[in-house]
Image (cartoon, rainbow, N blue to C red):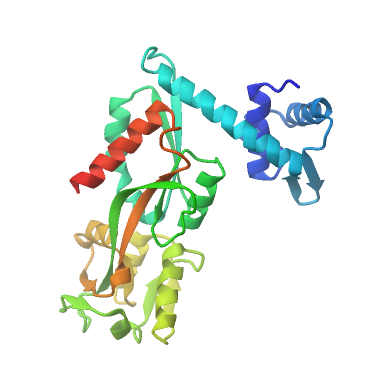
Amino acid sequence: MRFDLTDLRLFLQVVEAESITQGAERAGMALPSASARIRGMEEISRVSLLDRGARGVRPTAAGEALAHHARIVLGQMEQMRGDLQLYARGLRGKIRILSGRAAMAHLPDTLRRYLLAHPTIDIDLEERQSPDVVAAVAGGHADLGIAADTTDTGTLETRPFEVDRLVLITPGDHAFAGRDEVAFAQVLDQPFIGLPAESALQGHLATHAAREGKPFKLRVRLDSFEDICAMVSSGVGLAIVPEVYARRYQAEMAFRIVAITDGWALRHLLICARSFDALPVHARALVEYLSNDADDR
């Protein structure tokens, strides 16, 4: 049974996209060529690897087994390439990172310093919700993830990255604007600006509002913290956002920051991987950068 690395990469792209067409695009391959390769893999293995339906494709039991081994083989190849970086600077490596929104604000400076120190390494960084980050890393679709500790990381290995503090922001003339701190239950009668319903942070807040026995009143949902801060600054309502974003936009917008006394307002962000020791050497180096920055803070 002979599958080359191109076959394995293509198959994983198809499985992840749940589409031969999209998988071929991700692999940079023409659809007829990709389809022929998939058929050839099934002929060689003498078993169906994909269930094909009107809404796309899903791996069969045999396909799941192949995907599992493909991730191991490709991961080992990437580790080999990374280790050879120590001896051959001409080789290139890539690290795929998935991160929750709160962690994205803390990453640019560390990544800038890492990329300057490692000119032959590229980073593919994508924002996802924390549960999706964990699922993708566990499934081998990313090398590293950064997720909030409010998400179950299962069997993944974790290291601390950053502390994420949630704060209340209010218009400058609001009754709560002069306070140093406030309990969540005290503000639940106020109108809020929030994130989309599928946001992990919005779900986190809604859960704690329910525990207080009160609804979380949202006047509008916006997709960025900058827009949320601007809306609060204009006097539309209050919002609860990560402190790092509030500090970033406070200088240019007229809103106040108030601490939240509830314990759940302090979240810990975690670096996660299936196995830190099994990462390629350049990915292990990035973990050290992220971990050292966490120690410095």
Residue 184 at x, y percent in the picture? 31, 79
Residue 231 in the image: x percent, y percent? 34, 70
Say whether residue 284 is left or right of residue 295.
Answer: right
Expressed as whole percent of the image width and height from the top left, the position of residue 92 reads 44, 21
Q: Is residue 45 left or right of residue 161?
A: right
- Work out which quarter of the rendered image holds the N terminus and state it: top right
Q: How many marks?
A: 0
Task: Using the image, determine if residue 189 lies above or below residue 264.
Answer: below
Q: Nearer the viewer, residue 180 or 245?
A: 180
Place residue 30 in its image quadrant: top right
Residue at 23 percent of width and 64 percent of height: 253
* Residue at 36% from the left image edge and 17% from the top image edge: 86
On screen, residue 231 above or below 107:
below
- The residue shown at (46%, 56%) is 130
Residue at (41% x, 13% y) in the render = 90
Which one is nearer the viewer's eye here, 254 or 105?
105
Image location (x, y in percent) of residue 48: 82, 37
Above-or-below relation of 128 to 188: above
In the rendered view, does 28 fall on the left or right side of 239? right
**Quarter-of-image position of residue 39:** top right
Note whether residue 11 is visible.
Answer: yes
Task: Using the rendered image of the protein, determine whether residue 217 is visible from the camera's viewpoint.
Answer: no
